[in-house]
Image (tube, grey):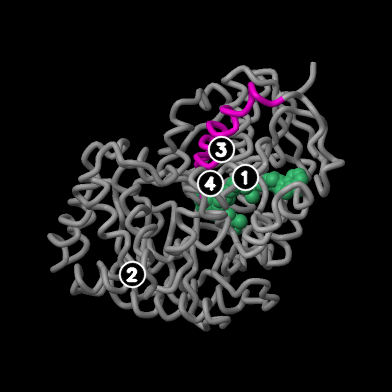
Amino acid sequence: MSDDVVVVGSGPNGLAAAIALAQHGAVVRVLEARQEIGGGARTAALTLPGFAHDVCSGCHPMGVLSPFFRTLPLAAHGLEWIRPSASVAHPLDDEPAVLLRRSVDDTARELGDDAEAYARLMRPFTWKPLELLDELLAPLHVPRHPLRMLRFGLLAMRSASSLARARFRGRRARALFAGCAAHAILPFDRAFSSAIGLLRAATGHIDDWPVAAAGSGAITRALAGLLRERGATIDTGVMVTSLADLPPARVYVFDTSPAQLADIAGAILPAHYVRQLRRFRYGPGVFKLDWALDGPIPWRDPRCLEASTVHVGGSFEEIAAAEDDVWRGGHPQRPFVLMCQQSQFDPNRAPPGKHTGYAYCHVPAGSTVDLTEIVERQIERFAPGFRERILARHVLRTADFERMNPNCVGGAITGGVADALQLFTRPVARLDPYSTPHPRIFLCSASTPPGGGVHGMCGFYAAQSARRRLDQSPVAALR
Ligand SMILES: Cc1cc2nc3c(=O)[nH]c(=O)nc-3n(C[C@H](O)[C@H](O)[C@H](O)COP(=O)(O)OP(=O)(O)OC[C@H]3O[C@@H](n4cnc5c(N)ncnc54)[C@H](O)[C@@H]3O)c2cc1C
């Protein structure tokens, strides 16, 4: 039987696009460059035998809340979400950590004088939250709930600095917001730099940021299981570098960077569109460390062990300065370090009594600097004795990420800069951002709306776009 659809890349978005098209009855083939599927949702024994590390994504608020994943029987294909009792812990010097818990009131109680201000900011997002997420995790569209979207949009378009200054007086609330906002990998004075912070904090009040039992690879294994059940084929070890590598099909969906799409299909796309693809901005990269640990992380405030994610960076001002420094090409001495402690909740990740540690910090694109000492010192600041627990470590620099996955251009992890210019109009400004000027070529990676994260929504919406072309396109080689 000939293929209707070829999907290039088996990341969460490639698999989501493939499933959505297979659900429509299409015969789908996925081509994956690596020997293993999963892209940014994979798990591997990076350190010692018996320790399972998430190579890229570690915590999955977007995965558990994804409007598309929620419709899929992923549990039947082995996916189990394990929820912590707090989504985020934010340790501070000389005072207790701040914990982001599901309850807005419980979280607000952590914030002293800002309790009421925090609750006022967050409470509206917890009313019918799934409706709001359906709207936010989508391309630009006429909102179904215009007033709620307007309320979110007016806050989200502000810079993280101005929102924090306007809403909070104390360092605890500001620090908590800074940790969430830093997921955007933008300077805090940029318009829209509060959007991802607000969304991240809101997700923590809708569900607890979970880890996947046995590792993030379980998410993509479940997606692949579901896809195969629908009759699709996944070929691994197939790196697509030119049109000649593609078998005949009706439509082609690329889970690749815009740059790769330009390299592979540039000859059959208009020159102005190829130029726009090449102008896409990917932003800073990351430096990542994984550890095999002799015990839990010895946080000075032991309540930090209740959270799946720990934002290590101190005050709002410190985190803002660190993110600004990275954006200007620097390597801060006190970086914002994003940690996950999966083994705290999932006993399958390490031998009895042992633990895994996962941390990354933002660095300039293409950075070759070894930040091991700086990252471990920053953790030690809030968890004295951390280094003594290290049995083995594994380092991933920007070039390692790009070698593993060409979508991570310069070590970037979210598909590209999510600023005012690229948040909605990724990869280029088009009414349908998943389509290209070629009627049979579509893009579905995190370089399309709604952007980075393991949620599959870029793939889902790209599939809706490709579906409209399926019946009009003959099975033929792409040229
Ligand atoms: C260090 C790190 C930490 C992260 N942490 C989180 C987190 O905690 N939570 C979260 O939700 N998200 C996180 N992310 C982001 C998340 O992993 C990505 O946004 C997501 O995986 C994007 O999915 P995708 O399908 O668009 O692309 P990818 O996951 O990048 O997958 C693309 C796939 O396509 C393949 N491919 C690319 N080009 C070709 C080609 N030419 N031929 C054949 N195959 C090709 C690649 O090998 C890869 O398997 C993290 C990412 C990184 C790197």
Residue wearing tag 4: 433
Marks 3 and 1, how far apart in space?
11 Å
- Pick the front one: 55 or 389: 55
Circle 2 sits in a helix, a strand or a loop, which is it?
A: loop
N-terminal-most mark, 4 or 2: 2
**The disc label shown at residue 159, or none:** 2
Which residue appears at 15% of the width and 62% of the height?
A: 117
For the residue marked with disc 2, what is the amino acid? Ser
**The disc label shown at residue 462, or none:** 3
N-terminal-most mark, 3 or 2: 2
Asked whether the residues under the numbered discs 3 and 2 touch, taking CB atoms below 8 Å apart as contact, a structural biologist would say no
Residue wearing tag 1: 436
Between disc 1 and disc 2, the foreground one is: 1
Between disc 3 and disc 4, the foreground one is: 4
Q: Residues within 10 Å of mark 1 (few under 14, many from 20)?
A: some
- Residue 188 locus on image (x, y percent): 38, 73
Between disc 3 and disc 2, the foreground one is: 3
Circle 1 sits in a helix, a strand or a loop, which is it?
A: loop
Between disc 4 and disc 2, the foreground one is: 4
Asked whether the residues under the numbered discs 4 and 1 touch, taking CB atoms below 8 Å apart as contact, a structural biologist would say no
Marks 3 and 4, how far apart in space?
8 Å
